[in-house]
């Protein structure tokens, strides 16, 4: 049996134990490489992945949101949401306001500076998406998304 491309990349001498292992390592390796590329792009704008994600969520919602809801919508789980918001506030990109009806709830909203920053970032972010997976046909992209969603079903928290 011939070596897989991943086996060569990892300089793995023996075949993978099971196909699930090879698929999982392919997902992780691809994710790592893509995250590195996006990380470099975000650093050009003095942001992290998580900070960009918060800003993107707020822009998409179009109105102030409770901190907890932002956390629920994040692509990657962020354990220290308060610290993340502290840094964004210090950069002048978000404002926080405590709810008058329920003091436990804190609303977060974008500043004009954040909207302008996101606007400047839109084209480079889309361009990087195209560089990384634009060589796939639309039908392949749809199938890739479908398969990843199906794979993610097994990772859903059990209530």
Image (cartoon, rainbow, N blue to C red):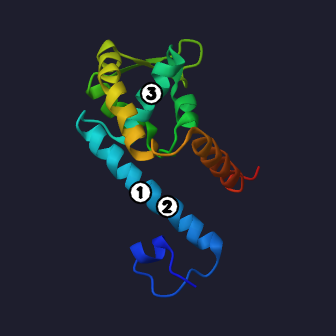
Separation of disc 3 and disc 1 at Cα? Answer: 21 Å
**How would you rate the neighbour count of disc 2 (Cα within 10 Å): few for under 14, some for 14-19, many for 20 or more?**
few
* Residue drawn at (64%, 78%) of the image: 18
**Helix or strand or loop: what does disc 2 sit on?**
helix
Query: Is 29 left, or right, of 155 in this rendering?
Result: left
Q: Which mark is residue 57?
A: none
Q: Earlier in the sequence, mark 3 or mark 1?
A: 1
Name the spot of residue 51 as percent of width and height, x first. Answer: 37, 35
Q: Earlier in the sequence, mark 2 or mark 3?
A: 2
**How would you rate the neighbour count of disc 3 (Cα within 10 Å): few for under 14, some for 14-19, many for 20 or more?**
some
* Residue drawn at (54%, 42%) of the image: 137
**Looking at the image, do the residues carrying marks 2 and 1 touch, with CB atoms under 8 Å apart?**
yes
**Helix or strand or loop: what does disc 3 sit on?**
helix
The residue at which mark 1 appears reads as: 32
**Looking at the image, do the residues carrying marks 3 and 1 touch, with CB atoms under 8 Å apart?**
no
Q: Which mark is residue 28?
A: 2
Name the spot of residue 47 as percent of width and height, x first. Answer: 30, 36
**How would you rate the neighbour count of disc 1 (Cα within 10 Å): few for under 14, some for 14-19, many for 20 or more?**
few
């Amino acid at each position: 049996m011939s070596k897989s491309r991943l086996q060569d990349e990892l300089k793995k001498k023996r075949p993978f134990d099971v196909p699930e292992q090879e698929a999982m390592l392919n997902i992780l390796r691809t994710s790592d490489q893509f995250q590195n590329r996006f990380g470099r792009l975000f650093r050009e704008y003095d942001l992290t992945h998580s900070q960009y994600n918060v800003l993107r969520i707020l822009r998409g919602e179009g109105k102030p949101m409770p901190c907890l809801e932002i956390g629920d919508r994040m692509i990657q789980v962020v354990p220290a949401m308060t610290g993340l918001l502290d840094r964004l506030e210090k950069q002048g990109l978000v404002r926080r306001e405590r709810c008058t009806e329920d003091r436990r709830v804190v609303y977060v909203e974008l500043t004009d500076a954040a909207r302008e920053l996101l606007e400047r970032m839109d084209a480079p972010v889309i361009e990087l998406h195209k560089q990384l997976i634009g060589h796939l046909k639309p039908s392949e992209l749809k199938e890739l998304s479908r398969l990843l969603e199906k794979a993610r079903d097994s990772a859903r928290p059990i209530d």
